[in-house]
Image: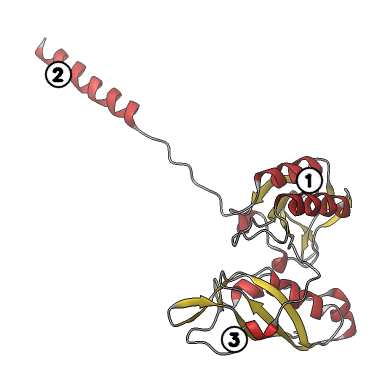
Amino acid sequence: MKTKLNILILLSIILLGCKEEKTIEIIPDYDRIYLPMNQLTETPQLIEGDSKKLLDSVMNTYAKLYPFEDTIKNKPTIEYKFMISEDGIIEKVFFGKNNDETINQIVLTTISNWKFNPGRKDGQIVKSQYPMILWWETNQPINEDEFSTIVENMPGPIGGIFAIQEKIQYPETAKRSGIQGKVIIQAFIDENGKVIHAKILNGIGGGCDEVAIDAIKRTRFNPGIQNGKPVKVQVTIPIWFKLQ
């Protein structure tokens, strides 16, 4: 009898322990499952869907929600990564953490029926990422004199130079034409570390200039610091394109 009692007590302890166990979700490494564009030899190409229509819809909504004269310093971003299957279907969507929920819903509704030619690596079809980062820009010129050229702590890309490099893909036009060299960009960074304007100081053509300036605009920086306070700073950034 005593033995049976001990067994019952032991089973009760085991069962109670099982009830208290929690399942911890393991988040997949999406950069391994869905290859970033800089790891592809052929990037996904949209074949069914209207990206211009989406852009116009998003920008019109953004302009209404956050007009240019709005004094909000940290306006929402418009940042997405579409995870494309081998069949060219969007399987998952990554939202930027500072996105606006209204615009997220517009994007989700619009892309539901999009179809891509899938990405390839070394001729093989693979799961891949298709980033879409939309920047709200105005035609109003900035006052470059407001941006210092030298401060105590100069701005630097969050994540280091790799944060810029991972956004760059060598244009096929430049490859076919044998174009290589250094693109020099002047970037104007505000107190929040956002690139609000950028221009080419020295270009090499073949689509490299556009790729370089787009990568800079899509990179967030640690702001420049002067006397312990963040300030506006302009920096010169060289981007190298070299054929192997």
Q: Quadrant of the N terminus?
A: top left
Q: Nearer the viewer, mark 1 or mark 2?
A: 1
Q: Earlier in the sequence, mark 1 or mark 3?
A: 1
- Which of the two residues, 61 or 47, is positioned nearer the viewer here? 61
- Rounded to the nearest angstrom, the CA distance separating label 1 from label 2 is 58 Å
Q: How far apart in space, not on screen, are marks 3 and 2 (Cα)?
A: 78 Å
Q: Which residue is mark 1?
A: 89
Residue that badge 3 annotates: 148
Q: Amino acid at mark 1?
A: Ile
Quarter of the image for residue 126 reads bottom right
Query: Which amino acid, mark 3?
Result: Ser
**Dot 3 lies on which element?**
loop
Decide: few, some or many residues near mark 1? Use Cα within 10 Å; few <14, some 14-19, many ≥20.
some
- Image depth: mark 1 or mark 3 in front: 3
Residue at image position (72%, 53%) is 127
Q: Amino acid at mark 2?
A: Asn
Mark 1 → mark 3, Cα distance in angstroms: 46 Å
Residue identifier under label 2: 6
Which residue does the image show at 81% across and 76% down from the upper left?
Answer: 210
